[in-house]
Amino acid sequence: MKVTVYNCREFDEKELFVKYGKEYNIELVLCPDAPDKENASLAKGSDCIDIITSKMPADLLEVFASYGVKYVTTRTIGYDHIDLAAAKKLGITVANAPYGPCGVADYAVMLILMTIRKMKRIMERTNIQDYTLKGIQGRELKDLTVGIIGTGRIGRTVLKNLSGFGCKLIAYDIYENEEVKNSGIPYVTLEEMWQQADVISLHAPLTEDNFHLIDENAIAKMKNGVMIVNTARGGLIDSQALIAGIESGKVGGAGLDVVENEFGLYYYDHKSDILSNRELAILRGFPNVTVSHHMAFYTDECVKTVVRDSLLGCRLFVEGKENPWEVK
């Protein structure tokens, strides 16, 4: 069997693809670029293609289908970048490659701590040998209420990680989890979340129903000085509303590993370019906003897991065996 791999990174993924390709007896075509209509021909003769967070709209899926592709796997947990309806119509199976929750959960806690301790400002001052204290007085987690939105594997791990800090924890999910309930952490409504939380950390998948979950109205209901952390999906937050909230002081700080409209920007070198994402440029400029480039997942364990499982899923699909990574 043959698999065409797109967005294959030379420095960390290529060696693993070669290793697992041999292990699973898969012929590989490795392409460093994102999939597009020009390089789709590389997939001719491949039942499967392997991608990351590149957009896969209907017209691009049609091109791949014309080359005989029947299976698209993404080396990510989320799959909102793939047009699922179009894939189904074209007879293409979509799969993801979930990794362990610890990497993102660790990163989320790090961003929470950095945000409440004003670490961006501290580091910027230290870099220019400004050792003054004015404006960098932080807060302690034990004095705060932290709200977790989304209590899947990652959200639950964040709750466990935070339990040792002595902060009050509350949670929201449309599907309440018994493990969370049994731990004594209360589920609240969104209205209660906005009213009670000093820090809000997002761990929900992006759907049509929760697009711009945090918008102007939600921010208006939040505590003054609320701090928002997002390691999930950028579309959960209305960037314009967040910018307005920061400028007014309503939002006291933010830690953002993801932002709206990041596709085509992240994972590429744009240091000599004018950013096409105006909101990202503005957010990066605030002294109380830490922005990283969708890399909370990025650990040794994660890279190994997503390469291995994405290829194993391809193998199982071609062999017609049960595949735990198929998106239903």
Image (cartoon, helix red, strand yellow):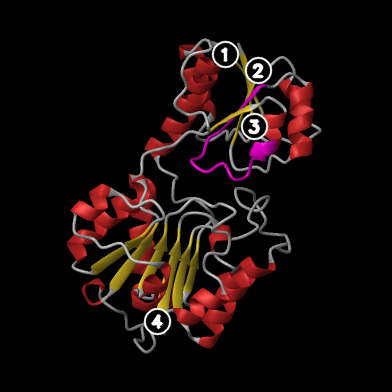
Upstream in the sequence, badge 3 or badge 1? Answer: 3
Which residue has dot 3 on it? 6
**Amino acid type at image mark 2:** Asp
Upstream in the sequence, badge 2 or badge 3? Answer: 3
Upstream in the sequence, badge 2 or badge 1? Answer: 2
Which residue has dot 4 on it? 223
**Amino acid type at image mark 4:** Lys
Magenta region? 70-85
Pointer 2 and pointer 3: residues touching (CB < 8 Å)? no
Q: State the separation of the CA atoms marked 3 and 4.
A: 44 Å
Which residue has dot 1 on it? 318
Could you tell me which residue is drawn at 50 percent across and 77 percent down?
219
Quadrant into which the N terminus falls: top right
Q: State the separation of the CA atoms marked 2 and 1.
A: 7 Å
Pointer 2 and pointer 1: residues touching (CB < 8 Å)? yes
Question: Which of 120 and 220 lies nearest the eye of the viewer?
Answer: 220
Query: Crowding at label 4, few (<14), some or many (≥20) Cα neighbours within 10 Å?
Result: some
